[in-house]
Image (cartoon, grey):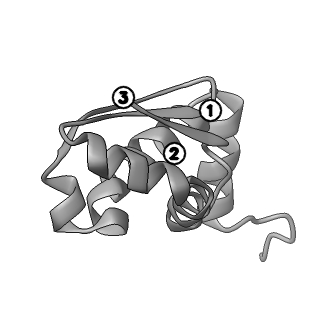
Amino acid sequence: MKRNNALPIGELIRHYLRQESLETPLNEVRLIKAWPEVVGPAINSYTGSLSIKNQVLYVHLNSSVLRQELMMGREILVRNLNQRVGAQVITNIVFR
């Protein structure tokens, strides 16, 4: 007997993650792990710690010159990082 109300396993997992409020923290971890891939090894070598709070990514940088350069391309970085994760995880980046 075939069931008509069967759902794909991926959809069930997404529903469970939303229900248990685990989707946002999981996406935040994915975004932080995607940082080196999005910015490349040169910029990543100047990066200290990364953290997310209230949809803002805080990036500690070792170079003030690089900080100024990245501030000008902030919107592009936000867009690229969110696209890599596949969700709207951050809305802004603060470089320190």
N-terminal-most mark, 2 or 3: 2
Q: Quadrant of residue 59?
A: top left
Q: Is residue 16 left or right of residue 71?
A: right
Residue drawn at the location 18% of the way across and 37% of the way down: 62
The picture places residue 96, in percent across and down from the top left corner, at 36, 29
In front: mark 2 or mark 3?
A: 3
Q: Residues within 10 Å of mark 2 (few under 14, many from 20)?
A: some
Q: Residues within 10 Å of mark 1 (few under 14, many from 20)?
A: some
| Residue 63 circle label | none
Front residue of this view, candidates 27 and 16: 27
Q: Is residue 68 left or right of residue 10?
A: left
| Residue 55 circle label | 1
Residue at image mark 2? 27
The picture places residue 12, in percent across and down from the top left corner, at 66, 53
Q: Quadrant of residue 1?
A: bottom right
Can you say whether 19 is above or below 43 in the image? Answer: above
N-terminal-most mark, 3 or 1: 1
Q: Residues within 10 Å of mark 3 (few under 14, many from 20)?
A: some
Q: Residue furthest top?
A: 53
| Residue 96 circle label | 3
* SS label for mark 1: loop
Can you say whether 43 is above or below 20 in the image? Answer: below
Mark 2 to mark 3: distance in Å? 23 Å
The picture places residue 73, in percent across and down from the top left corner, at 53, 60
Front residue of this view, candidates 41 and 3: 41
Residue type pointed to by label 3? Arg
